[in-house]
Amino acid sequence: MVTLTLLHPQASTPLQQWNFQSQSTIRIGRSPDNDVILNNPLVSRYHLELRATPAKSGDRWQLVNQGTNGTFLNGVLVSRGLVPNDALIRLAREGPMLKFQIHSPPPTSSERVISPPEVKGCDHKGNPPGNLFCIHCGEPLVPVQGVIRDYQVLRTLGQGGMGTTYLAWDKMGKSRGHSNLLVLKEMNADMAQISKAQELFEREARTLKALNHPGIPQYYDFFVEGGKKYLAMALIHGQDLEQRILHCGPVAPPQAIEWMIQTCDILEYIHSCDPPLIHRDIKPANLMVRHRDNGIVVLDFGAVKEIGTVPGTRIGAEGYSAPEQDRGTPVTQSDLYAIGPTLIFLLTGITPLKFYRRRSLGYGFDLSTIPTITPPLRAVIERVCEIKVSDRYQSAKELSQALAACR
């Protein structure tokens, strides 16, 4: 397996990671049809390819540059060359840096769990097709993949650079004061060797445990089993806004505004903590809409930061991150900044970077070509995305009131 890790340009800490288990060619560039997409103006649309060549000792990987600004392998400008393990690949002289690593194939999902299955699933008759649980006894209908501590793993929900999430069943959940059905998040073994990744994973657990808001997933448990860290939390039945828009298309302004007002309510809560907390990763993919009430839930608290702590690693999504956050000095108004580009995405279905361009007084979002954005809403977005923090709305409550006036 090949792992590519995007590194912070100054601190060399991991920002994002991609794993490739069986691909023989890995394409890297700015275009959305690449395997690794890097939204940086120094990166060409199709900047480079990594190609595997079979050898007796395993695959040998070759780098082929296709970018206008060149590619540097361990500091040397190359057009084509073999890539050693742990090599550093920089796209353009001042562009993003990737660390290249070769690993043994990861264990399968069934091998990840700690012990063999305990149950085969309920066999009561009369359950509708596709039901996950028995309508008679409430037990799982499907065979469990395995058991991690007391949690029966029903299926894998997703896998990313940081961890794998499972849908799990806790038979004793009700007696422990929470739902039987929950989400179990496992920190990936290859990320456990990176101290910053461990810090972010544990920070999410500590943060969720301390928070209590209907718009934030409820914390259930955090533990270490078999040398791996796990976080158990409430399952949210819904869909994140990124997937919602990609599957169903843009929404009308009243709906987009309502969702952002709800997001502001959650931000007001975490900004009012003692000390105040900054989420640092507000974006459509981290905002989930509950099916039952169309309410917003803010996800992924791994990047959360307390006000007053020392400047840290630059964390944030391209196009949604405020200028001061890009410099590693976020404030609560940095979370509010992300509401602007999120609204642009909800109303257009297009990445907000497409509307970010140079203007007379610097860079900003050009909303003149978006017909669904009314003049009042345009004024709100422009203000919340001002370059200077002092020129923005100063609290989530103030922004919420401004949005409500645009309904």
Image (cartoon, helix red, strand yellow):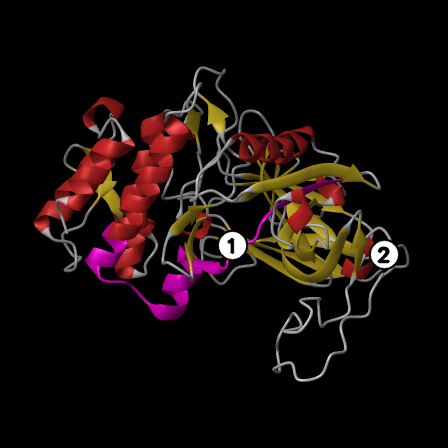
Residue drawn at x 65%, y 50% is 174
The answer to whether 208 appears left or right of 369 in the picture is right
Residue drawn at x 16%, y 32% is 361
Check disc 2 and give the amino acid type: Gly
In the rendered structure, which segment of residues is drawn in magenta? 229-257
Q: Position of residue 403 (x, y in %)?
A: 19, 44
Q: Is residue 233 magenta?
A: yes
Answer few, some or many: residues within 10 Å of disc 2's Cα (few below 14, many 20 plus, some between 14 and 19): few
- Residue placed most toward the observer, 316 or 140: 140
Q: Position of residue 316 (x, y in %)?
A: 45, 38
Callout 1: helix, strand or loop? loop
Residue drawn at x 49%, y 57% is 46
Residue drawn at x 68%, y 47% is 175
Quadrant of res 340: top left
* Residue pointed to by mark 1: 236
Check disc 1 and give the amino acid type: Ile
* Residue pointed to by mark 2: 58
Q: Is residue 143 magenta?
A: no
- Residue placed most toward the observer, 395 or 54: 395
Pair 2/1: label in front: 1
Q: Quadrant of the N terminus?
A: bottom right
Answer whether residue 88 is visible to the viewer in this image.
no
Quadrant of res 364: top left
Residue at the extreme left of the image, as rendered = 375
Vertical order, 206 against 121 (above or below): above
Q: Position of residue 156 (x, y in %)?
A: 67, 60
